[in-house]
Image: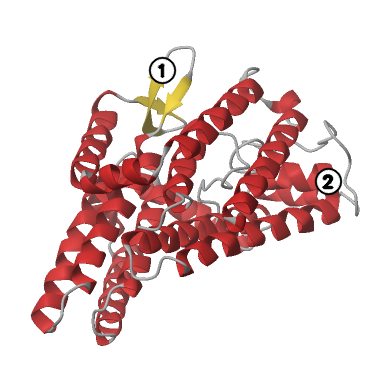
Amino acid sequence: MKDRKKIFFLLFLFFIISIVTIYSTTSYLDDRYMLLKQVIFYILGFIIIFLVNEKRKEKIIKYSFFIYIFLNILLLLVLLIGKEINGAKAWFIIPKIGAFQPSEFMKIGLILILAKEIYKYNQREKTNFKTDLLLIIKITILTIIPSILTFLEPDTGAVIMYLVIYVTMLFLSDIDRKWFYIMGIIIAVILLFFIGLYLFQQELFIKVLGSDILYRLDRIFDWLNGKGMQLENSMISIGSTKLWGNGIKKILVYYPYPATDFIFASYATTFGLVGALILIGLIVSFDMKLLKLANTKKSSITSYMIISTTTLLLYQQIQNISMTIGLLPITGITLPFISYGGSSLISNMILISFSTTKKMH
């Protein structure tokens, strides 16, 4: 119970940090209602957390397959009739509210259905080569379907999140550990194949993966060379701050997406090194509290969901913070609970609601 209260308290602190940081970036924002929308999204998120009790969670888990199918249909529809923004067709536009991004909610569907499959598998008395292989094939197919649909948008960041969930679930399963070596070799061969195509057969490479892949590769090359206006300005902005930062609404260097992808740069510029370390400390504390909840619900669907949720959040946190300071390539991954975005925030709140129900599953 204490851990639940601490998680809610930390979420409230994230809310304050998010609102203040978004307000600090208002001079660079296209949407003047962004701050108000974030407040509304957070209120909806907290309502969801308090509405999801054990019975409702049981029903959601029971219908996980239908949720998964519904979300895949949305991913397909967004490719056909969705709104294209910044070269990606990943959103439905809801008048006077904003954009709805199905790929963010797909991580919920994937966690639900994979946790259920892994739980059923781990309840078996006996497992062997055949049962292991069938499980791997099943959860691989379940992951590949939304990954392909999301890759076509294109939204590489979301695809990576699906793969993080997939790998986490595999580690939670009772399959023979030798499968990880086999899969590692297969992945290495596939990567070498595509690297070979890129180096020696670029026309075929583009035909297989599409022309958008070149833009994604350019981001990686820019990162390796330390180039790119977005990255350079982000690092200049962060580097120009002192221990306590420049203060609210004093972001002097422009970089795109200051309230979403690069909100950590905005926060660090505003509150300085001390503020950045405090935020990182709060994030670590939040993740540890979630893992502690998982430890109290051993060998259950809920524990698998909490661990995969925490792993996913940890990946996003590391990726987002690292890309703003040049340690990792820019992928469009937002900082959970801090970056602006209704789809991202509400989907994360839903995942947290599954983790913080009072009764153990």
Residue depicted at 82% across the width and 41% down the height: 270
Q: Element type at marker 1?
A: strand
Query: Where residue 249 is drawn, which disc sits there?
Result: none
In this rendered view, identify the residue nearer to me: 317 or 4.
4
Residue position for label 1: 94
Going from N to C along the chain, the mark reached first, 2 or 1, is: 1
Residue type pointed to by label 1:
Ile
Q: Which residue, given by chain and number where applicable, does mark 2 sit on?
A: 271
Q: Nearer the viewer, residue 239 or 353?
A: 353
Residue at the outermost left position: 130
Q: How is the image coloured?
A: secondary structure
Three-letter amino acid code at the position of disc 2 = Phe
Q: Residue furthest top?
A: 96
Residue 48 against residue 188 in the figure, above or below: above
- In this picture, is 187 found above or below 44? below
Where residue 91 appears, as percent x and y from the top left, is 38, 29
> Residues at badges 2 and 1 in contact (C-beta under 8 Å)?
no
